[in-house]
Amino acid sequence: MPQTQTMTLDEKLDLSCKAALLDKAGDKEGAERTMKLIPMPPYLAKWAKKHMGPNFLIEYGWNLSEAEAEFGSDWLNK
């Protein structure tokens, strides 16, 4: 399910720090889940779609809200 709320840079940095702490504590899965809450930048999402396929983005649960805002909600199907 896409996230629709815009995330500030401070919120993104806060989540990144939390993920780093989880990783340092040995919780790799928790760190990964936390990082996936941060919207993937549109340029990176576009690259990943082209080189890894849309299923990679969907199946791994990446937050694509910024890409959807820039490219439209149906961009993965185009």
Image: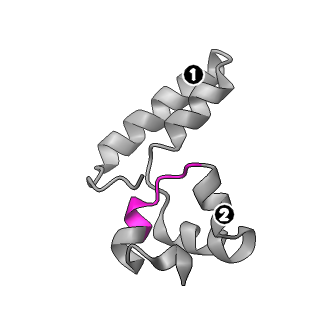
Q: Residue at x 54, y 74 (%)?
A: 76
Q: Which residue is mark 1?
A: 22
CA distance for labels 2 and 1: 27 Å
Quadrant into which the C terminus falls: bottom right
Mark 2 packing: few (<14 Cα in 10 Å), some, or many (20+)? Answer: few
Q: Residue furthest bottom?
A: 78
Q: Residue at x 67, y 27 (%)?
A: 28
Image position, residue 44 (x, y; %): 57, 67
Which portion, as a residue range, is magenta?
A: 61-67
Residue 16, above or below 5: above
Q: Residue at x 63, y 49 (%)?
A: 60
Find residue 42 and name its label.
none
For this view, does 46 lie left or right of residue 63?
right
Q: Nearer the viewer, residue 55 or 5?
A: 55
Q: Nearer the viewer, residue 73 or 31?
A: 73
Q: Mark 2 vs mark 1: give the one in front.
A: 2
Find residue 55 and name its label.
2
Image position, residue 33 (x, y; %): 55, 35
Question: Looking at the image, is mark 2 or mark 1 earlier in the sequence?
Answer: 1
Image position, residue 25 (x, y; %): 63, 15
Q: What type is the residue that disc 1 sits on?
A: Leu
Q: Residue at x 37, y 76 (%)?
A: 70
Residue 28, above or below 43: above
Q: What type is the residue that disc 2 sits on?
A: Asn
Residue 47, above or below 58: below
Image position, residue 42 (x, y; %): 47, 69
